Image (cartoon, coloured by chain):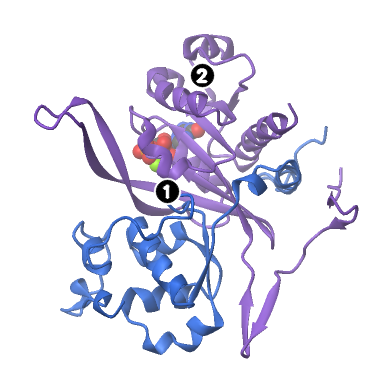
Chain colours: A purple, B blue
Amino acid sequence: MASAPSPTPGGYSVTPTEPLVRHTAGRAVVRPPLPVKLVIAGGFGVGKTTAVGAISEIEPLTTEAAITEVAAGVDDLSHTPRKTTTTVAMDFGCITIDPTLKLYLFGTPGQERFGFMWDDIVEGAVGGLVIVDTRRLDDCYAAVDYFEHRRIPFAVAVNAFDGHVEHSLEEVRWALDVSEGVPVLVFDARERGSVRDALLVVLEQALARTEG
Amino acid sequence: MADGRTPRGAGEDGVVPVGPAPAVRPFLVTAGRVAGAGEAASGRPMPVETQLVATATGLDELDRLSFEQHDIVAACRVPQSIAEIAARLRLHLNVVRVLAEDLRAAGQLSVHVPDSGVTHDASVLRRLIDGLRAIPDSRGVLRDSD
Ligand SMILES: Nc1nc2c(ncn2[C@@H]2O[C@H](COP(=O)(O)OP(=O)(O)OP(=O)(O)O)[C@@H](O)[C@H]2O)c(=O)[nH]1
Ligand SMILES: [Mg+2]
């Protein structure tokens, strides 16, 4: 099916092919694309970087992000919550949809705890993909909780390492206790088409949210 | 901003830093500022996908900019996200946020913070879906239409 150009409120359709350029003082200034962000989360070594790399048009880049962690309990003297700032490596890639629209994929660092310290990365994301290794289901609880509490549309993708999963999707759904509407699927983080389809499921979730 | 132009610490011995920036660098580069500047009007930090583009003024004044400021404006001839600039120039994300805000105030950089109402709009999501569907898998096979 050829993708139809999106209609605008004005009743005409726009299909950009070239970036918009403005010439000021003899210099060309390019109008940036609208950046849309998806977050790829999950425990250590589940295949987040692999998934980003499989579909990104650039080699995944890594940057250091500061996360603020609020420790459980309070400081004995000041009675304020203890905050510590940790620096974590976060990697990301992107897909240019057209000159005016670009999808960014941010992989959160694998950690058991996935608290509100991730807001710096996740703020404004249209959706999330939680990658799961069925041998270590516990590792992704925090990510599932995070997206559910933030009401961010997401899907759970079981990475079939070497074509094997240790639990059926029904078992994974039960073990993670995800809400009924959350898609749970199997994918291969190394396969571009497989990652594409998993991202499509997330975007369909986000779209359904706008319509529902 | 004049006193914000600190010497390039790691570069004094002529060695180009290759690893992640040491923890102390962010404070040198931003003259100790860590918060306040770099926050969007909402009071939240600029999202990591915020787009930065050099302005005509910024490109004209490039020779007068020093170090990180110079490198950011030069790299932003092509629009880039805060995250891309941080990764490519090996700067901390928060350093890029602070410097981008300074450069914006000086008219040398334009900062495009995405409006989440627009990015979450159904028409934008449909364009993303159509665009992704057009990506072939590694064997060149397109996704089945449905
Ligand atoms: N056989 C197989 N190996 C995979 C698959 N996905 C990832 N791997 C390997 O598993 C290892 C971990 O994958 P990464 O993509 O680095 O995982 P990650 O989630 O980014 O890991 P952290 O960032 O360290 O949390 C790498 O050696 C990958 O090559 C898969 O589907 N099958
Ligand atoms: Mg990784």
| Residue A100, image x, y percentages | 69, 60
* Quarter of the rendered image showing ligand 2: top left
Q: In this view, which residue lies farthest toward the right?
A: A11
Q: How many marks?
A: 2
Could you classify mark 2 by the number of other residues whose Cα lies within 10 Å: few (under 14), some (14-19), or many (20 or more)?
Answer: some
Q: Is residue B99 left or right of residue A28?
A: left
As helix, strand or loop, the secondary structure at mark 2 comes to: loop
Choose mark 1 or mark 2, whichever is in front.
1
Q: Nearer the viewer, residue A62 or A121?
A: A121
- Quadrant of residue B18 in the image? bottom left
Taking the image as drawn, is residue A170 in sight?
yes
Outermost residue toward the left in this view: A77
Which image quarter holds the C terminus of chain A?
top right
| Residue under pointer 2 | A165
- Is A5 placed above or below A86 here? below
Quadrant in which the N terminus of chain A appears: top right
Residue B22 in percent (x, y) is at 21, 59
Q: Earlier in the sequence, mark 1 or mark 2?
A: 1
Label 1: few (<14), some (14–19) or many (≥20) C-alpha neighbours in 10 Å: many
Q: Which residue is mark 1?
A: A91
**Residue B21 image label:** none
Task: Tell me: residue A85, above or below residue A138.
Answer: below
Residue sitting nearer the eye, B8 or A91: B8
Which chain is indicated by disc 1?
A
In the rendered image, the vertical position of residue B137 relative to residue A21, given as above or below: above
Q: Could you tell me how far apart the alpha carbons at marks 1 and 2 are, in whole angstroms?
A: 26 Å
Is A77 in front, or is A197? A77
Give the residue type that dot 2 points to. Answer: Val
User: Is A43 placed left or right of A30 in the picture?
Assistant: left
